[in-house]
Amino acid sequence: MFLSHLTFFLSAIGFILFIVRSNKQEPFELFLTFFSFLFFSSLGVWLYLEYYYTDQSLMVLDFYGVINENFALLAPVFCAALFGKSVPKSKIFKYFGLLMLIGVGFAIIHLLIAQDDTEHLIFYPTNKNMHINAIVQLIYNISLLSLFIYYLRKINVNKGPELFDGVYKKVFSILFIVYYILDNLFFISILVYFNDIKVFKQMYYVTLVSNLIMTLLIITLAIYTNWLFLITRFKRNWQKDYSQQDETKIIDNKPFVLSNQGERIMNWNDFKQTHINDYESVISNIESLEFLTKTEKLYAALQPFNLAHKELADLLSVSLRTIETNFYRLRVKLRKHGCTEDYPYQQN
């Protein structure tokens, strides 16, 4: 009972970490948030029916669980497919509609297969067709896992306007691959022990441990998605020793002003062409940092102007989240190559 309550509490934290900073989320982040909600809600229903409301709990949990799980299995595919992409709101609603349609449709297929002379529970040993449903679910799971890996392999952390570092991609990958594997193991166990009710009931405890693992991974991903940049920035500001940054302080106090402030800047080349006369030393300095990508060079050049992230978002026509993640990538890259995180990015 303690483990069930602990897992539910932690899943609530993971969901809250996603929704607190849900303003102007990227398309793939919406599906991440949706996945965290599905996981949190399923644990909540499970906990409520198991310990606080016993009447017909198995039937309610069974039907709810099938629909919820089908949604949750589809969400990672949409996350990977939309990772780093800009999609109109109307299209996002269509994607969610497609997810709902497939999830509910597949749950109805399960229900039709499960119709026999017993209690009509889909995944319970009393149903003689349970093994058929388990086989169908396994095929469905493996198909979605293959589709997820296909889209995952297409994600390039070094390209595109929405950038996360390789560590984020690893956390993102591990979370969902572990989820698919644990779910597949559950249905394989059903096939192996489908006539043994005692073993089937013991699987409940194995599922609790699996849910705890998933919950911790969701919290980790929520921190990487929404909070790591803020944590890094706070740590950076806290550790900064202004007394040893005289040269940087003089440069920071220089009245940097973008001559075309308010107009859109397309890329690093656009910035260079527009500001080469006013900020030749800045551009030359940053061009010498050959380990930076063109996107990172653009953000390195914009940092000395001390513009608010909202101003930069308008200037570059991107989201606030894009600004945060790209600055985070820049600072990680600078630290990796032994450079200061502030302009003029000198060697430590």
Image (tube, helix red, strand yellow):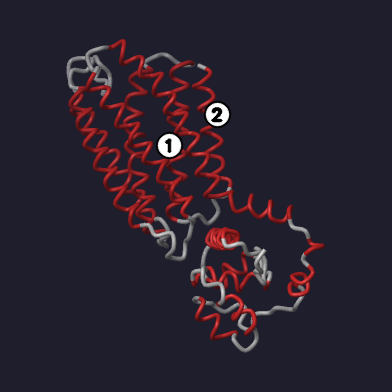
Task: Name the residue located 64 percent from the left edge and 49 percent from the top edge.
Answer: 231
Q: Residues within 10 Å of mark 2 (few under 14, many from 20)?
A: some
Q: CA distance from mark 2 to mark 1?
A: 14 Å
Residue named by callout 2: 9
Assign the C terminus to one quadrant of the image.
bottom right
Residue carrying label 1: 38
Tell which circle, 2 or 1, labels the residue nearer the N-terminal end: 2
Callout 2–callout 1 Cβ contact below 8 Å: no
Residue 298, given in percent of the width and then of the height, sits at 55, 73
- Residue nearer the viewer, 215 or 111: 215
Indicate left or right for 142 with 216 as reference: left
Give x and y (percent) for residue 284: 59, 81
Residue at the extreme right of the image, as rendered:
243
x 54%, y 86%: residue: 273
Residue at x 28% of width, y 43% of height = 144
Q: Nearer the viewer, mark 2 or mark 1?
A: 2
Task: Relative to 89, say whether 291 is above or below.
Answer: below
Image location of residue 7, percent across then percent down: 51, 27
Q: Amino acid at mark 2?
A: Phe
Q: Is residue 28 left or right of residue 154?
A: right
